Amino acid sequence: MAEILNVTNNGGAGIGLDGAGTPTGAPDNAGTNGAANGAGQQDVTPKTYTEEEFNKALQAEADKRVQQALKTSRTKMEAEIRKQIKDEQDEAARFAKMNAEEKAEELRKKNEADIEKARAELSRDRCCLPQALGCLCLPELRRFLFLLLP
């Protein structure tokens, strides 16, 4: 048999239960819907939900929030991709205006920057490895892994 939940929706604050199973969003002592100075007072009557209805409403709210987060994430990703495309187009246009010597110099600088970036990542990883191994309580494993390091 489905349990009956008595839940109040207070001004769009949502429905829910606190940790003790008491409905959240209950009206204040005056019986208003949070209206200031008594203006626009309305009686808020609690709506009774079955456990199934409550779970369905809760799932719908969760789905709505997930969809909103996905939409926001997609918008940010699209903006980032547009920026990357624009940057690549600008670089290609600038590169097309260069002569052979300037192109070679630009490629050399770009390759040096990529190598330095890779070295920094490798250095960072090597610095973090001993700390990560220190967390392990297996001395044999630590000795083995240190043998693998150059």
Image (tube, grey):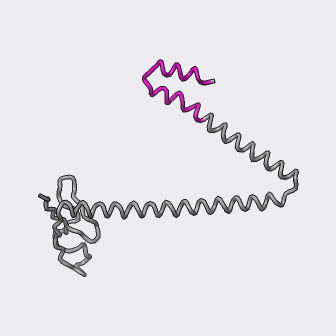
Q: In which quarter of the image is residue 3?
A: bottom left
Q: Is residue 57 above or below residue 105?
A: below
| Overall secondary structure of the magenta section | helix
Q: Read off the magenta span.
A: 124-149
Compare residues 30 and 53 and report the one nearer the observer. Answer: 53
Q: Quadrant of residue 136?
A: top left
Q: Name the residue furthest left.
A: 1
**Which percent across, then down, holds residue 49?**
18, 65
Closest to the observer: 40 or 85?
85
Q: Nearer the viewer, residue 133 or 54?
A: 54
**Does 131 appear in magenta?**
yes
Q: In this image, 16 relative to 90: left or right?
A: left
Quadrant showing the C terminus: top right
Q: Which residue is drawn at 31% across and 64% down?
A: 60
Q: In this view, does 97 lie to the left or right of 88?
A: right
Q: Indicate whether residue 43 is drawn in magenta.
A: no
Task: Give me the residue at 58% from left, 23% from top.
Answer: 148
Q: Where is residue 64 in the image (x, y as percent from the top left)?
A: 36, 64
- Indicate whether 13 appears above or below 150: below
Q: In which quarter of the image is the N terminus?
A: bottom left
> Dividing the picture into quarters, in which one does residue 51 lie?
bottom left
Q: Position of residue 11 (x, y in %)?
A: 27, 71
Is residue 43 placed above or below 81 in the rendered structure? below
Name which residue lies at 28% across and 61% down. 58
Find residue 144 and report its horizontal and vertical position in percent.
Answer: 53, 20
**Residue at the far front in the pictured view:** 1
Number of numbered callouts drawn: 0
Q: In this view, does 33 lie to the left or right of 103?
A: left
